[in-house]
Image: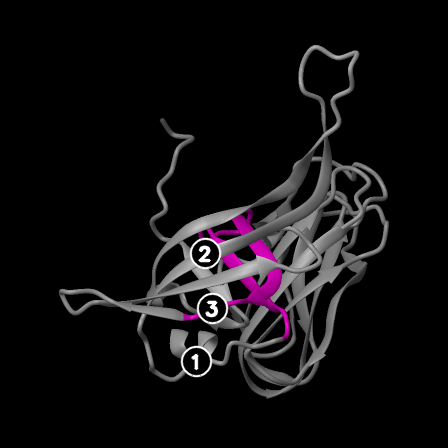
Amino acid sequence: MAGKSSGMGAALWVAGYDVGASTNSLSRIGGGPAAIDMTDITQSAVSRLAGERDGGMEIVSYWNPDAGGSHAAYSTLPTSDVVATYAHTQAIGGPSASVIGKQINYDGNRTQDGGFLLNVQALANGYGLQWAFQATAGRRVDAAATSAASVTALDQLTASPGAFGLVMWVHLFSLGSGSVTIKLQESSDNGADAYADVVGATTGALAAAPTALRIATGAIAVERYLKVVTTGTFTNADFAVSVYRHRIATVY
């Protein structure tokens, strides 16, 4: 069936490192609210309410000690939060899943046939796992400040559902020089309505890579079309962006 697809051609980005080519598999990409039992004596079946959100990723990595490889990404076992993003395809509008949280391990396992795989878990911290849509076609390289063409816009298919805001996930893999600001602009029709900045959907000036961020706007209405633009004085910014526009009022 045309609506089905495999996991081939995917990507995995962790803390601004592209570790897809060093990844054997992802054994878990999951999350959601805990189910709290709220059944009372008048009910004839279990009643539940949504509790705290959680989520995380469980990654099986190959050993790759090359510069910029998976060992560089995972071996420091950072105590600060890291951003991990799985991109199911590398196309604008393609689904992605992101989490900001703690990397809690980097456990090696040498098999009898000489293979060496390492297990990594990224567990959500403060926010649950977020399914979103890619606003860049996988990785994008801007040689200098770029106002992207309207044909590269992410079409969310409907007008703003309300003043619910959005979440933006950004990985900056490398930067030749200078500092780059990565931000979103919006339009209601991708044409006559001129693109304008989405309030709060900006990284601010980034001068070092690799790095990754989660950015949430306030409770604003976000229009149908979104495109990624870069500003600043820089050379060769290599980055990827995913976006989720909230459909309902959300505490996130």
Q: Residue at x 66, y 60 (%)?
A: 125
Q: What count of labels does the image hold?
A: 3
Numbered badge on residue 58: 2
Earlier sequence position, callout 2 versus callout 1: 2
Numbered badge on residue 105: 3
Residue labelled with disc 1: 72
Label 3 crowd (10 A; few <14 / some 14-19 / many >=20): some
Label 1 crowd (10 A; few <14 / some 14-19 / many >=20): some
Q: Position of residue 215 (x, y in %)?
A: 72, 62
Q: Look at the image and tell me in which quarter the N terminus lies.
A: top left
Give 88 or 139, whichever is nearer the viewer: 88
Q: Is residue 123 magenta?
A: no
Q: CA distance from mark 2 to mark 1?
A: 18 Å
Q: Position of residue 206 (x, y in %)?
A: 67, 80
Outermost residue, bottom side: 177
Q: Secondary structure at mark 3?
A: loop
Q: CA distance from mark 1 to mark 3?
A: 14 Å
The span shown in magenta is: 80-106
Rendered view: 34 above or below 62: above
